[in-house]
Each structure stands twice: as structure tokens, then as C-alpha cells.
Image (cartoon, coloured by chain):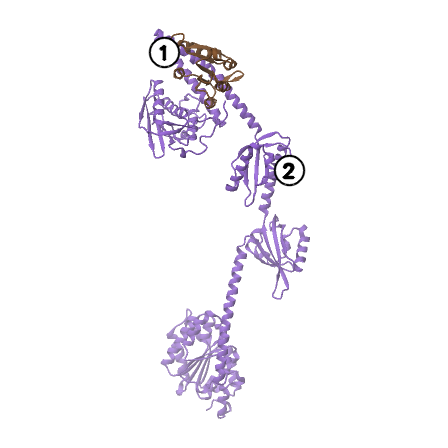
Amino acid sequence: MTQSKQKKILVVDDEPDIVEFLQALLRQDGYSVTATSQGEYAEQIHSDDLPDLILMDIFLSGKDGREIVRHLKSREETRHIPIILFSAHPNTEESARAVGADDFVAKPFDVERLLTKIAGHF
Amino acid sequence: MTILSNNASPDPGTAEAISMTRGNAAPGLNWSEMNSLEHFVQFYGTDAFLLDSLSGFIGAGLLAGDACIVIATPMHCEDLEKRLQTNGLDLLDAYTRDAYIVLDAAEVLTAFMVDGSPVPERFAEVVEGLIARAAQGGRHVRIFGEMVALLWAEGNRAAALKLEELWNHFHQKTAPFALFCAYPMHDFAGEIHRTGFIEILQQHARVLPTEGYNILANSEERLRAITLLQQQASSLQAEIAERQKTEETLLYLAAIVESSQDAILSKDLDGIVTSWNAAAERIYGYSTQEMVGQPVSLLFAPDQQDEFTQIMERIRRGERVDHYEARRVRKDGTFLTVSVAISPIKDRTGTIIGASAIAHDITEHKRLEAKFQQLFHSSLIGVFIADFAGTFLDANDALLDLLGYTRSELQTGMMQRDSLTPPQFHSLDQKAVQTLQETGLSEPYETEYLHKDGKPIPVLVAVTRIEQTDTCIGFVLDIRVRKELDKRKDTFISMASHELKTPVTSLKGFLHLLRRSATARKNAEELHYLDRMDAQIDRLTKLINDLLNLSQMQTGQLVYRDECFALDALIQESLENTQKATQTHRLRLDGQTQAKVFGDRDRIGQVLINLLNNAMKYSPQANTVLVHVAKERDEVIVSVQDFGVGIAKEHQRKIFERFYHINDPKGKTSPGLGIGLSISHEIIKRHGGRLWLKSEKGKGATFYFTLPLSRKNKSPDTMTSKGKEG
């Protein structure tokens, strides 16, 4: 995989361990990964540095991932970016899809399934 | 002729005089010409009349030189003798010549009656002897007999008729004699004697009616008399019919009174009880015998005697007393409450002669009313009575306190459902009123009421229609505390999910990275250990999920997705995944449904995996688990069969209860939280299916569950339990 063709994934989670694992996993699989624990960062992405996919936890400290999805999906320049939400909380999948998330994965991850889903968006 | 005293020749007028009777009372017959062959019967009203006839019959006989036998009561014998002697007959002479034989009828009867019936042979013997004595020298014989009348009077009608027959039989056989029977007419009074009377008439050649008829001298008068009698008979019949009808009406009314559940009694103007029905016996405890003739004031307590006096005064004035509530005393001294109505009773002339009272025992009713009032007012739960339009007509203190209103505010109509309820709940109220009108009660529903200060209060409301009215009684439960707890529980579930799952997610994630590395280095031993760790992490994940599911089920927050999926694929997938994680058992699938099922695919999969894991866990000695699927009419049926320890009958029902564990007799308790089957049961139930098992101790177990094929088969609430998100 060449640098130019490398897909960029933005990981948003306020758990450092999860961020570290996802970064390691996705890099091993050849993705370029940017990670943040700040929901605001995800909200503020703009056209000169857009990721190809966003992996985001729903419950971030001080921010609801679903609000961020709603915001990004309402913006012309970010609307097309696939967003996979994940959560450890029960009963969140429907609301995740309702706000426009393209996919949902429950925590703890079934890693193979997560990778399949990510690959499915490219 | 020597029969007359003084040996005087019979005066030609004597026989006539006798036959025509003295004082118009004798039968209009010529006794001297009485056919000797005749057997005739005389009915009489008074003894005087009988004696007129009898003295005519015997007197004329003696005068004619006939022999006469009189078998009668001693009184009749004596009176007859007096009459005959007054007529100048020399009875002493007749006695001595056996021309006048007098016998006591009762005594003669004893000579031939055996067991209340005349014995023909003995009768013949007695009568033959008498007639032989009388008929000496070829004399004609006249007999007067009252034995039949005696038998009839004592009620032995069969014997009387039998005796008449014997006389008739004898009459034809022996020397000719005239036989005179007499019955007092009053012995035939009553319709029941009709048949017997006719039979007696048939036994006689001639019948002489009672006095009234015989005095009529010519046939013209007799025809008139007959007509009159006919008229009397028909009017009597009409009268009888009328009385029967009246009697029936009275019986009917009496039956109504007797069968009434209310006490019905009557009293005269002095308050003395004159009638007392069965309900009165039951309600007051006095029997009819005890009460009739006693003052009705017995039922009044000593301090109520004034009430009694006032009532009697009103009755005497002809007023009626409408239903009023009164306290009374039973025979045993206990009090009761009755609702009484009293009306005067008047006789034909309109004079008030007493009063009737109808009393309904409302003791129980009063007791219930008091109980209800107590319940209504002392309840911790808010209670109201409202009309369907939404005006609160009454409310207890608990509700007034809850909503901050005073009783006077309630009474001035300030409490209206619509203003008490935040607008977003109005439709709920309207729905409740609608079901109330249709079914009489509404399911309890959660809504909010507004405190007078405007603060909303979450409440649970259940309403029941008060029968036959457009009002209802409502129960209001303050659920603020529960709502608060629910909120905390939601938060707890959220927190617990996060706190428990985050470390597991990390563990699993890094483990995955390690596995990749071990795989790359082809380190089999490491890989093996990592796989074991992964399996344990999965197990931990499952336990966490089960606990969370359970908490959510308790608060009705477990969300079910409603999707259409192919059942066979789900079963195949669940089986393969479970098979991958086990080395001990082979999971065999039998059958297919090709059915689409509606519901939450993941949750159904959860049930199946749970059943498969249980099957393996409880059959450690076996190596096979059989899964069978089939489509049956409108449902699919899935079974999971193991060949393990089985489940004893006593556990089979409880096994679906939360936290239930079967304790091994060896003291070994099976691992797990004891919640898997309870969750599975709940999930299947929510899908409109059933989950059950068949097992015997030591012979393995088979768990079955069904799922309906069509959406229509689901009960409407099966998929609607969507709570808040965590």
C-alpha cells in the first residue's frame, strides 16, 4: 500500500488504552490513523485534512458522539465520510443509526468483525 | 188390629195424618203404601225431620200389622218410641209379639264387623235371625237401619257401601221387607263426598231428599223448587270457583311474602304483631310463633321507644312512612340497621286497622360503607371520585396533600383533570376514559399531575368505573421515589456498562495484537495460552451482558429490534460459533424451517447459544447435543437435546426463575449466575413464543422454544418495550 493510497482513519475515544490498541491494530493493517480523545477535534475537521473514515465512541467525556455525527452529517464537506460508532452501553445501536452513523459496533469488539466492517467502507 | 192402644180401630185419617206428618216436616209419602220390596234412603238435616219420617214409616207399619225392626242409635230409638207413643201406639204389645224389635246400631255392628269390614256370613246370620223373628205368621217386615250411617260418619265409607250391598243382596234373597236407611246430610258436605254420595244413591231403589223438598205438596211447586235448587247449585259453584281463585291469589301473595328477602310483618294499631314472614325470622332472630301476638316494640332499643310511639301515631293518622334507616335489636341483643317502609292497612270500610312494615337489612351494607369510607380516607394512596368529564367530585386527604389543594377548593370544583394534568398527558387521560367507558376499568398508567404550585408530580393512576354511573373511582400512586430510583438505576447501568466493559475491551484488543504476533512467530504454546485467555474474556463479557440484560429487563428497558430474518441461517451460525469454542461435544443439527422470523436476531441467537452452552455444561459425560428445528403451522419450533444429568421434576418449573440453581446432592453447585434461562425465557416470551423443557433425572434434557411465523401472532406489546438509552 503506497502512502498516497493509504486510507486515513480518525479514531475518537477518551480511553487511552482503546485508542492505543486501535491505532496499533489499524496501522498493522496498513491504515493511517489519527487519534484523539477530544470530541471537539472531530467536530472541527475541515477540508484540508479530512479522514476517509471515522471510528468514534458514543460516550466521550463532555460530548455525545451522536451529536458529533449529526453535526458532521449536516456539513456539506464532511457528509460523505463514513462514521462507525461504538459503545459499551446497551441499547445504543438504534440511536446511533438514527442520527446518521453508517455503522455500529458494540464493545468489547469482535476484532475480526470490526476490521471487516471498516474494510467494507473502502 | 191390636196394635193401637185402647184397641181402638184405626182411624182412617190416622195413617194419612201420620203420612202427611205433623207440622209439615214429614216426607210427602204415604208410608202405609210403602212398597215392601223397596230399599230406600232418607237424607236429613235435623233429627226432628228424620224422626218425622221414621215415626211415619214405623207407625204406619205397626198400624198395618207389619213387624218393624229398628236398628238405630239409642237416642233415635228413644225419641222414636216417644213419638210413637204420643201417636197412641201400644208398643209394649208390639214388643211382646216381636212386632217391634229395637236394637242399638253400634252393638249390632260389632256382631258382624271384623277388622273394619262387614263379614257377609255373619251379617246374614244376624239379619236372618231378626227377620225370622219378625216375619212370624207371614207378617210384612219393615226395617230401619242406621248402621251404614254410623260407618259413614266414622269415615269407613268402604264398609258403609259394602253393608248397603249386603242389604241389597239379602233383600232379594229372603222374605220381602222394606228397608229404610238414613244418613245425616251434613256427613256429605263437601265436593270430596260426591262420588261416595252417588254410590250410596245407586244402592237404593228410592231416594228421599231432605226436608226442604218433601214439604212441597204438588209437582208444580217441586219443579219450582228444583229450578231454585239448580240456580243455587250453580251460584254456589260460581262462588266456590271465585273463592278458589281468591285463595290461589292469597297463596301466591303469601308465597311472595314468604320468599321475600326483606322482612315483611304486620301489626295492629296497638303495635301487636299479626304476621311475620320467613325473612323476618332470619333477620330479627324471632320465630313466627314467638313474635305473633307480641308487641313489635320488642325490636326497638329502649332508647328508641319514642320512635315507636311516633310511628304508631303517624299510622293511626293514615300516613305512610317511606324508607328510612333505623336501628333495631335482634333476639340475641345485637343491633342491626334496616331500611324500613311502613304503610297503614285498611279494612273493607276504609278504617285503619294496622300497618305493614317492610324492612331491608342493610347492616352489611352499612358496614361495607363504613369500611369504604375508612379505606377512602385513611389510605396512603390518593383516591378520587370523578365524573367522566373530569371534575373531581371527591378526594381523600392523601391526594389533596399530594396535589396541594384544600378540601374547600375541591368542593368548589377547582380540581379539574385537564388543568391538573400537563397538556402532553391529556391524550393518555382521554384514552383511559375511553377504555373505562368500554370495559369499566383502565389499566394502570403512568402520567403526571400538576401540584397547585405548578410542579409536575409523576403518578401511577388506575381508574375503575362505578357501576351504572358516569363516575369513576381512581387510585393515584405517587411514583416520584420510583422515578428517581429508575433514573439512578439507568445511570448505574450506564456506568457499570462502561466501567466493566472498557477494561475487557482493552484486554481483548491487546490480546488480539498478541495473537497476531504469536501467529507470525508461529509460537504454538503462546497461541494456545492466548486462546484460553480470549475464551475467558468472552466468558466474562457474556456474564457482564447477562447482568446488564437482567437489570434492563427489571426496568423494562431491554430494547428489542424488530427485523425479519432467516431462522435457519441464524441457527447454523450460532451452532458453528459454539462448535468452534468447544472440543468436548459435537453439535448436530437436524431439520430446517426455511422460515422467516420477525424479531431481534441477536437476542434469539443469544437464547440458542445459552441453551447450547447449558446442554454441554450439564452433560459432561456425553459428547453430542442434538438441535432439531421444524415448522409447525404458524410457528417454528426449535429444540436442544442433551444426554446429560437431566433435571428432576421439582426443579423444572423453578429453573426459569432468576438466580435459581440446582444443588447437586454431592454438594456441588453448577457454575454460572443462574440468570441465563430467566433471560432466555423473557426474550422468547417477548417474541410471542414459549420456552419449556422435557426431562427426567438422569436421562438428559430437551429444551424447546417456539417463535410465531407471522407478525399477527405477536401480542401487541411484545416489541414495544423500548426504554431510554444508557
Are labels 2 and 1 on one chain? yes
Looking at the colours in the rendered structure, which chain would you say is drawn in brown? A
Asked whether, in this view, residue B297 is left or right of residue B576, the answer is: right
**Residue B421's spot in the image, x, y percent?**
58, 33
Along the viewing direction, whichever of B603 and B27 lies nearer the viewer = B603
Along the viewing direction, whichever of A25 and B657 lies nearer the viewer = A25
Q: Give, as a three-letter code, the residue at label 1.
A: His
Residue with the mark numbered 2: B414
**Circle 1 Cα neighbour tier, 10 Å, few/some/many (<14 / 14–19 / ≥20):** few
**Residue A70's spot in the image, x, y percent?**
49, 20
**Circle 2 Cα neighbour tier, 10 Å, few/some/many (<14 / 14–19 / ≥20):** some
**Residue A60's spot in the image, x, y percent?**
51, 16
Q: Chain B's colour?
A: purple
Residue B197 in the image: above or below residue A113:
below
Q: Give, as a three-letter code, the residue at label 2.
A: Met
Q: Chain of mark 1?
A: B
Residue with the mark numbered 1: B528
The CA distance from mark 2 to mark 1 is: 76 Å
Image quadrant of residue B423?
top right
**Residue B360's spot in the image, x, y percent?**
58, 51
Q: Secondary structure at mark 2?
A: loop
